[in-house]
Amino acid sequence: MMNSPYHIYIHAPWCRSKCPYCDFTVFVDRQPPFEQWMAKIISDVQWTQQQCSWNPQGPSTIYFGGGTPSLVSIEYLKTIIDTLRTPKTSEITIEVNPGDVNPTTLGFYKGIGINRLSLGIQTFNRQHLKRLGRGNTPQDTRQLLNWVQDAGFDSWSIDLMFGLPNQTIAELESDLIEMLAFAPPHVSLYGLTYKEGTPLARAKNLGKIRDIDEDLWVDQFNLITQTLQRHGYLRYEVSNFCKPPHEAKHNQGIWKNEHYIGVGPGAHGFWTNGTRTHYPNTWPAWIEKSEPLIEVCTKEQQAIDWLITAIRHHQGIYLPRLKQFGYTLIVPPQIQQQPLFQQSLHIVEERWALSESGWIVVDRITEILVQALTPLNQHAE
């Protein structure tokens, strides 16, 4: 455990405006208290490192998410990175929105050790950008992508959204053509979801906008995945594609249930002692609270947490790993005989992974597998 890899997630909670679909912990502040935030981030990481045994070689990855971490001044990012990274740290990622950076900023990022960018592109369509509440134009997006290509980062990724209100297949196809022209090493897909309490969900409930129907959603999902695969992208997680070796090391660590320190307002963590943590969502509560809320998980909850992330990864579930939690999978014969189960899972010896047709029904397969979790002692009886 002590020598196993771990990761650090740092939440920068500020945005210029809050997107109507977003339910993350986000603040809109004209003068964000960056210095106060930076000091507490460093303090909370160092405090956490003292609470249980972490790999003494330091974090494998550091990830600045948000919010919009590209709003944070270089000097504060540099101080955090200089304090927390070690020679063991192989990947440092920052999320960037179009319109927030320029070639000089990107040069500074490289200079302070950031070697991976996650670009919040979402769509190249002006109308859909406006509907999503994005503050940038398609031209801002193209300009950013040109700058990133010239900057020479080790890796970078594009976020692409689909399932947008009134979005047609032709519009999505146009987005894909334009995106692929920039040859991103990595692509993350996000189907639009209407999170309760967000302005977009309220607009939908009032009938002001309408969700696309399920068949069109499936068609869009399939169009994206087939197009990316045709252009040489490997799907290594349900919503993530790359040209090897550009897998996101930080995200892969989370999907593989590796431990991580999560700091910042609303951030979650998973410690090496098996506990899960959560910091308060509001600025006053976060800045005043010296410790996160700590949840001690049962073996069953640990097994469920591992299963629901492992099945989303192309390597799938390895039964000997599940048995380390004291559980195995016993699927009732009547479920095993269903076409959904047979067609969606590829089972070879002790490894269960999604088949090509299984990716789109991952939520249903996950429900079946969680219900199939059986304690080893019960199985032995």
Image (tube, rainbow, N blue to C red):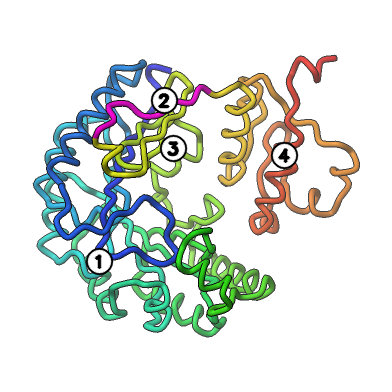
N-term-proximal mark, 1 vs 3? 1
Residue 149's disc is 1
N-term-proximal mark, 3 vs 2? 3
- Of badges 1 and 2, the one in the foreground is 2
Residue 369's disc is 4
- Sort mark 1 into few (<14), some (14-19) or many (20+) by Cα contacts within 10 Å: some
State the CA–CA distance, disc 1 to disc 4.
Answer: 42 Å
Give amino acid for label 2: Trp
Task: Specify the segment rendered in magenta.
Answer: 288-296
SS of the residue under disc 2? loop
- Residue 107 lies left or right of residue 211; in this view the side is left
- Sort mark 3 into few (<14), some (14-19) or many (20+) by Cα contacts within 10 Å: some
Q: Residue at x 67, y 70 (%)?
A: 214
User: Residue 106 versus residue 96: which sits nearer the camera?
Assistant: 96
Residue 193: in magenta span: no
* Residue denoted by label 2: 271
- The x, y position of residue 344, in whole percent, is 73, 52
- The x, y position of residue 231, in whole percent, is 49, 68
State the CA–CA distance, disc 4 to disc 2.
Answer: 25 Å
State the CA–CA distance, disc 1 to disc 2.
Answer: 36 Å
- Sort mark 2 into few (<14), some (14-19) or many (20+) by Cα contacts within 10 Å: many
- Residue 257 lies left or right of residue 149; in this view the side is right
Give amino acid for label 1: Gln
* Residue denoted by label 3: 253
